[in-house]
Image (spheres, rainbow, N blue to C red):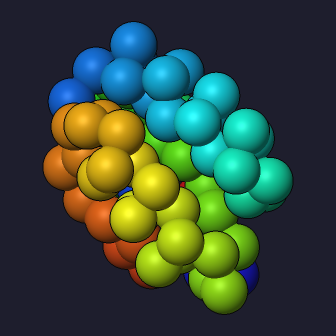
Amino acid sequence: MEIHVITFQSVAQAFRAEKILKNQDIAVKLIPIPRSLSGCCEGLAAKIAEPDITAAVEALSKSGVEMIQRGVRVRAD
């Protein structure tokens, strides 16, 4: 199974992103960064449904959230 994620500079940015996306009625779930993106598995990623990726990235960009990877498709661990 593949999922789409957005990764962040820090855990604080991930929590900020979650709040912003929920306020925009975009479904989001914070998960540990998938191993395929980070060998050490530190930090959080936002799991977003594929149809919502563009809207999520735009909302976070406008709000100044620091993203590393935007809507990357990865295999679920």
**Could you tell me how many numbered marks the image carries?**
0
Q: Position of residue 10 (x, y in %)?
A: 28, 21
Apparent side of residue 2 relative to residue 64 in the rendered image (left or right): right
Q: Is residue 23 above or below residue 55?
A: above
Q: Residue at x 70, y 50 (%)?
A: 24
Q: Residue at x 46, y 55 (%)?
A: 59
Apparent side of residue 75 relative to residue 49 in the rendered image (left or right): left
Q: Position of residue 61 (x, y in %)?
A: 29, 52
As rendered, which of 3 and 62 lies closer to the eye?
Answer: 62
Q: Is residue 26 above or below residue 9?
A: below
Q: Which image quarter holds the C terminus?
A: bottom right
Outermost top residue: 12
Q: Position of residue 17 (x, y in %)?
A: 50, 35
Apparent side of residue 24 relative to residue 44 in the rendered image (left or right): right
Outermost bottom residue: 51
Any part of residue 55 in sight:
yes
Q: Which quarter of the picture shows residue 71?
A: bottom left
Q: Residue at x 73, y 58 (%)?
A: 26
Outermost front residue: 62
Q: Residue at x 53, y 72 (%)?
A: 55
Q: Position of residue 14 (x, y in %)?
A: 45, 28
Any part of residue 39 in sight:
no
Q: Which quarter of the picture shows residue 12?
A: top left
Q: Which image quarter holds the N terminus?
A: bottom right
Apparent side of residue 45 relative to residue 7 in the rendered image (left or right): right
